[in-house]
Image (cartoon, rainbow, N blue to C red):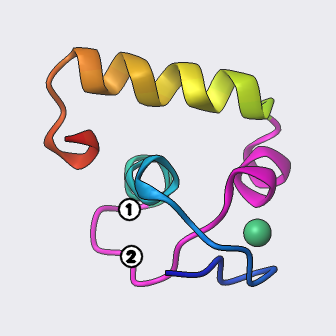
Amino acid sequence: MQCSLCGEKVGRDEVGLTKKLINRGTQEYLCLACLSRRFRVSPEKLLEMADAFRAAGCTLFM
Ligand SMILES: [Zn+2]
């Protein structure tokens, strides 16, 4: 999968975060850098959020 904005490769956490932050049915995924820019959240914070969602048992991050 690729970032719909910059074409970077998108991993599992980015896919999960995109679904969580934008919407579950999205067909477009954003890489960490683009998510960070769009939501004004640092990449470190985004990864923390992914960890927190995973720890909470969110199936988007399994
Ligand atoms: Zn991107």
Q: Residues within 10 Å of mark 2 (few under 14, many from 20)?
A: few
Identity of the amino acid at label 1?
A: Asn
Point 78% across, 54% down: residue: 38
Foreground pick, 32 / 27: 32
Verify whether residue 46 appears in magenta: no
Residue at (38%, 76%) from the top-left corner?
A: 26
Of residue 22 and residue 42, the one placed in the foreground of this image is 42
Query: Residue 4 sits in which quadrant?
Result: bottom right
Q: In this image, 17 relative to 32: left or right?
A: left
Residue at the image point whose x is 50% and y is 24% from the top: 49
Relative depth, front residue between 32 and 22: 32
Ligand 1's image quarter is bottom right
Residue bounds of the magenta highlight: 23-40
| Residue 52 image position (x, y, % from top left) | 38, 16
Badge 2 vs badge 1, beta-carbon distance below 8 Å: yes
Q: Is residue 57 above or below residue 61?
A: above
Question: In the figure, residue 5 lies in which quadrant?
Answer: bottom right
Residue 27 forms part of the magenta stretch: yes
Going by the numbered disc 2, the residue's amino acid type is Thr
Q: Is residue 20 left or right of residue 31?
A: left
For label 2, the SS is: loop
Residue 41 shown left or right of residue 18 in the figure: right
Tag 1 residue: 23
How packed mark 1 is, by other alpha carbons closer than 10 Å (few <14, some 14-19, many 20 or more), is few
Residue at screen point 55% across, 19% down? 48
